[in-house]
Image: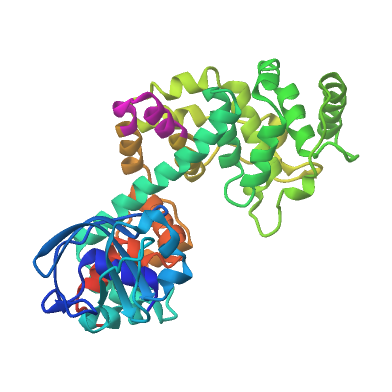
Amino acid sequence: MNEELLQYIWQMGLFDHEGLFTTNNEAITIIKRGNINHNSGPDFSNARIRINEADWVGNVEIHIHSDDWYLHNHHQNADYNNTVLHVVLFQGKPTQRQDGSTVPTFIIKDKIIESVLFQYQKLFKNEQTIPCQYFFPNIDHFTVTQTLERALFTRLERKSEQVFKWLNQDNQHWQTVLYKSLARSFGFNINGDPFEQLANELPLSLLGKHKNDALAIESLLFGIAGFLDNKLQDEYHSKLKKEWQFFRIKYGLSSMNNKSFKFMQMRPNNFPTFRLAQFSSLIHLSSHLFDRLIEFQKKEDILNLLNVQTQTYWNTHYTFAKETKKMNTELSSMSKNIIVINGILPVLFAFAKHTGNTELSQKVLDVLYSLAPEKNKITDFFKSLGIRIPTAFESQALIELKTKNCDQLMCLKCPIGHKVLKSKINT
């Protein structure tokens, strides 16, 4: 038993409400358990507790041991003077407020519903991929749907926070924010960080000065990324390097360490050099990209903006000086979906939130409901549990649920965890 679980038990009322008494043998009637407080101060506020015949409105504090009240110095803190009930598992010395008056104490230990503790042990003391894995076959469709919807909106809100950080860094310039978000998404998962660093090092305004010169854009991107600092027996590399040396002096630029870009255990079409070539083409061929995106009507309007082809050199190269057979350099359908999901929609959702554009935020959700889902270890795992994942809406929700809830053992804040703890489901 920990304090978080004890707070949850109080919040959800998972205990016998009959025959309650304080440690001074005063009858307790719980009229309202109060509102949980996620900030500093007492655990629950605006509770209404009847002790004997008197109704008290104030705060409820939860502790494993009543002596924790003193350990946390609540007896010296005026914020706790309006505590009307101290709920504990174990009783020590009497609880006193700052003025010396006694706080009524209720020992909840023998009143907790036994099945709650049993289910809690099952959740947190197993070696499955997620705590509730045993219970999944018995979780109703409504609870699963509710959980996924909440996870999806949490993910969009969390990604919006990153967008707003960029916005503050870039003087409220949405085009630059989109550029950084797209750069990170072109790095996909493993190279997202160095691609974002590249966008931070190379201002969009500088690329804009050479918008119509594809060679100049590639030389700037590959130069900043550190791929033009070495000497190779490759004519195209030499041409880019010559351009880069000119721009480096003209604009006072410096290179990143290209060792930050990962190539190991990757398919060639995911090599960062090849993705940089595609990103360069997008910058070169796209005009007023942000303005066009916020006016989109359907997913095809966004996907079509990613129909770009690289310079012909990349038809036979995944990286410099290593020729391969001729190939199609367009972004694959799956790559487009991932870039839309991770690079474009979060910016559009944040912009809709920033401007109060509810129509745009709904269109973002509509796109997620219409795009194909991602395929990865997380989605494969949930499919094995019988979860249907027809669209990106579900796959994004499940990725958020697994990484931010399940992996962090946040069961007490999850609708599925609530269902398990409040039920008598057996495995």
Residue 22 lies, in percent from the top left, at: 21, 76
On the rendered structure, is 221 left or right of 125? right
Residue 183 seen: yes
* In magenta stretch: residue 350: yes
* In magenta stretch: residue 412: no
Counting labels gives 0
User: What residue is drawn where x is 43% and y is 56%?
Assistant: 399
Residue 148 lies, in percent from the top left, at: 31, 54
Position of the N terminus by quadrant: bottom left
Residue 308 seen: no
Residue 166 lies, in percent from the top left, at: 56, 33
Compared with 379, 281 (above or below) is above
Name the residue at the front extreme.
100
| Colour scheme employed for the rendering of this structure | rainbow
Compared with 104, 195 (above or below) is above
What residue range appears in magenta? 347-361
Position of the C terminus by quadrant: bottom left
On the rendered structure, is 150 left or right of 158? left
Judge by depth and name the residue closer to the eye, 295 or 144. 144
User: What residue is drawn where x is 84% and y is 25%?
Assistant: 248
Compared with 85, 356 (above or below) is above
Residue 50 lies, in percent from the top left, at: 13, 65
On the rendered structure, is 334 left or right of 57? right
